[in-house]
Image (cartoon, grey):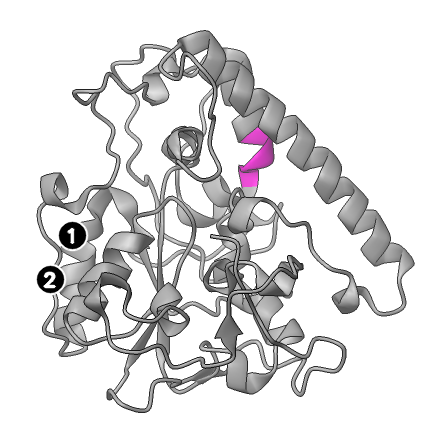
Amino acid sequence: LYAAYTVHISNPKVNDRDRQLRQLNTKIEQKLEFVHITKTGGTTIEREGCLGGVIWGSMHYFEDLFECKSSDIKAWKNAGHLTYDMISPWHMPPRIMNRRIDDDMNPYLGSSKLFTIVRNPYTRWISEYYCPHAGYKGAGKHNEDTMNKWVKNKIQKLEIVYANYEKRQKESETPWRIEPPVHFHKHFINQYEYVYDFTGIKIVDHVLHYEHMKTEFDGLMLRYNYNLTLPSRSEMHTWHNGVGLDRRLTWKNLRNSTVVAINRFAAPDFGAFGYKPVQTLYQSETYSPDPHDGVCTKFRPGESRSCLREAE
């Protein structure tokens, strides 16, 4: 969905309020706001929310999607200006949105608590590969060679793009005005960028795990008195680790060189969220994609070994 909304990015009203969260929806007593990271089951969260009368994520921008109530960011509109700010804003990390977007366009400012879902980087990359929007679109989709080559090539290109972006930021007197790289609807962004601000402060209050999504989501909803629960995994229509009827590849099909590439690119995600990186996964019968440790309460890349972690 190439879509855009009208924003004023040249002179945002607020540039440094990364820890303020706003209750945008005025029709519902909103206590939680959802941060949608790609390929972590976010569409399921949005669908179940809107069917229960709660507007989250892309529901703020789209009219009547999933039979949801009307959107509440009315400046959103289909347009042809494919700038970073205008493409899939529900996938924009809060720390970037808080610097680039006006307050009245930002669902993350105010009194609501933010929550998100993260997942093991190995399974997330498999999910990105199979994504109908940003994933592989050629022949032989279930071919192991094809999948490993695609993942390694994608990571190599992303590393070049991000290196150029960081270089431009360092050379600029106003680095926050440098437009971040635009990948297909903000896919492939490392997950830690959504959870922590630029100083390492955790700005998303509740980090749930894809691997335990129903249990953790249902528990969070109960805590905040939402009358919402997720269906069983088989009814969520989300990809899972097992080989399905369509013979999808899994993390067990990742070869050593692909594992090394993912370890390098997604190192901050392994560190911040307690997932275990390994050197080999191919046909492993012992590795578990589940988190092995709690989420860092404060995190900057390279500092995960000493971070204080939340209780699991």
Instruction: Give the dominant element type of the magenta stretch: helix, strand or loop.
Output: helix
Q: CA distance from mark 1 to mark 2?
A: 7 Å
Q: Position of residue 186 (x, y in %)?
A: 54, 50
Q: Is residue 7 left or right of residue 308?
A: right
Task: Determine whether the residue tagged by mark 2 lies in a helix, strand or loop.
Answer: loop
Q: Position of residue 15 (x, y in %)?
A: 67, 80
Q: Is residue 312 visible?
A: no
Q: Is residue 302 above or below residue 50?
A: above
Q: Which residue is labeled 2 in the image?
A: 229
Q: Is residue 52 left or right of residue 279?
A: left
Q: Is residue 19 visible?
A: yes
The residue lying at 16 percent from left, 67 percent from top is: 51
Q: Which residue is labeled 1 in the image?
A: 214
Q: Position of residue 258 (x, y in %)?
A: 52, 18
Q: In the image, is residue 157 part of the stretch drawn in magenta? A: no
Q: Quadrant of residue 100?
A: bottom right
The answer to whether the residue labelled 1 contacts the one labelled 2, judged by CB atoms less than 8 Å apart, is: yes
Task: Determine whether the residue tagged by mark 1 lies in a helix, strand or loop.
Answer: helix
Q: Nearer the viewer, residue 75 or 228?
A: 75
Q: Is residue 247 above or below residue 241?
A: above
Query: Farthest bottom residue?
Result: 26
Q: Position of residue 94 (x, y in %)?
A: 52, 68
Q: Which label's residue is closer to the chain start, 1 or 2?
A: 1
Q: Nearer the viewer, residue 95 or 267?
A: 95
Q: What's under tag 2, amino acid-wise? A: Thr
Q: Residues within 10 Å of mark 2 (few under 14, many from 20)?
A: some
The magenta segment is 263-267
Q: What's under tag 1, amino acid-wise? A: Lys
The residue lying at 48 percent from left, 12 percent from top is: 146
Q: Residues within 10 Å of mark 1 (few under 14, many from 20)?
A: some
Q: Is residue 60 left or right of residue 220?
A: right
